[in-house]
Amino acid sequence: MVTGAKGMLGTDATALLEGRGHDVVGVDLGDLELTDAAAVKAALGDVDVVLNCAAWTAVDDAEEREDDARVANATIPQVLAEAAAATGTRLVHISTDYVFAGDATSPYAEDAPMAPRSAYGRTKAAGETAVREGLPDAHLIVRTAWLYGAHGGCFPKTIARVAAERGGLSVVDDQVGQPTWTRDVADLVARLVEADAPAGTYHATSGGETSWFGFAQRVVEAAGLDPAIVTATDSAAFPRPAPRPAYSVLGHGALERIGVAAIGDWEERWSQASGEVLATP
Ligand SMILES: NC(=O)c1ccc[n+]([C@@H]2O[C@H](COP(=O)([O-])OP(=O)(O)OC[C@H]3O[C@@H](n4cnc5c(N)ncnc54)[C@H](OP(=O)(O)O)[C@@H]3O)[C@@H](O)[C@H]2O)c1
């Protein structure tokens, strides 16, 4: 079962898992009330694995509506974990770099302490804790970051559109992370499940690192424009309700320890993904 099946990651995950021969049931808002413990338990009856992609992902809105964000990002994972414990189902729960403070200078290990700085991050951290406590032996928490994909609004699509419309743009150079393709996350989740990976926390981000400015240059290039039209600025020029992590680079030691290949370098992955991602409005 894939929850949040119509979201950016859920859409790719559903297609990829079906392509690998898995029998997938996708649920999204309106299909199954994921806060209803009895309904979720009944729905998980004969499900081997549930992949939870459902989430409140509006990072800025969460500052004003933390209680609503908490329902999607913490209550639902708790209900899923408790139902999965009762039905013998494994749970793959998708989480985020926002559980960290974002002020490190070397990649965050999977067991680095969580210290969220935003409402969104707090609710996602609470979701992780609920999953670890509710299903200690049968969960995979898969953190990702800086996602882009064909089936949703995302940074590369915005940058390509603005670059074409305005002929130039400035992008922040003081936030560093790992641009990551939803299809690569879906593929890694499939490989973890198929390998029967030990319960625990894994990082599903591309290798290497760049700033949003660096990524925007590669996006503009892929859109057939001159990367020199992108200029660097800093976060002070773009005040937002929720603080953004300055450093969101995640380490991949846990994957290495179990012999599951991490996602490749972000630039190589973007060169594979860009045609498909930018072709979809
Ligand atoms: N996007 C990123 O850069 C990023 C970075 C790090 C981690 N993540 C994590 O990756 C996962 C997938 O994110 P995404 O980018 O694919 O997000 P998305 O496109 O917003 O997808 C989330 C899906 O969950 C659905 N949903 C929201 N509330 C729900 C509820 N109460 N019950 C059932 N479904 C609900 C949404 O429906 P509606 O659209 O109708 O609300 C949407 O279809 C999330 O766990 C997110 O925290 C994302």
Image: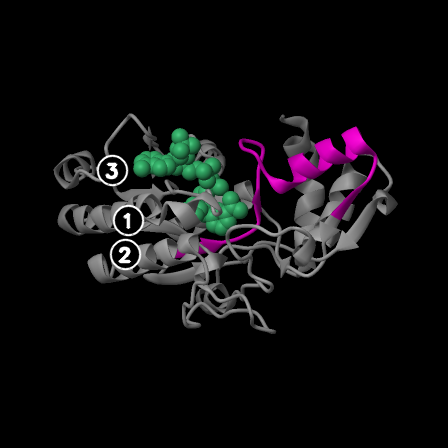
The image shows a total of numbered marks equal to 3
First-in-chain label (1 vs 3) = 3
Residue located at (39% from left, 62% from top): 201
CA gap, disc 1 and disc 2: 6 Å
Q: Please name whichever residue, 236 or 174, is drawn nearer the observer in this view of the structure.
A: 236
Q: Please name whichever residue, 29 or 143, is drawn nearer the observer in this view of the structure.
A: 29
Left of 144 or right of it: where is 168? Answer: right
CA gap, disc 3 and disc 2: 14 Å
- Asked if disc 3 and disc 2 are in contact, CB closer than 8 Å, the reply is no
Residue located at (54% from left, 58% from top): 262
Q: Is mark 3 within 8 Å of ligand 1?
A: yes
- Asked if disc 1 and disc 2 are in contact, CB closer than 8 Å, the reply is yes
Q: Is residue 78 above or below residue 30?
A: below
CA gap, disc 1 and disc 3: 9 Å
Secondary structure category for the residue under label 1: helix
Q: Position of residue 20 (x, y in %)?
A: 45, 36
Residue located at (27% from left, 56% from top): 131
To which residue does mark 3 refer? 34
First-in-chain label (3 vs 2) = 3
Q: Is residue 3 above or below residue 218?
A: above
Left of 35 or right of it: where is 110? Answer: right
Q: Please name whichever residue, 85 or 165, is drawn nearer the observer in this view of the structure.
A: 165
Viewport quadrant of the N terminus: top left
| Amino acid type shown at disc 1 | Pro
To which residue does mark 2 refer? 131
| Amino acid type shown at disc 2 | Val
Residue range (magenta): 141-170
To which residue does mark 1 refer? 77
Q: Position of residue 101 (x, y in %)?
A: 49, 67
Image coloring type = one colour
Left of 119 or right of it: where is 243? Answer: right
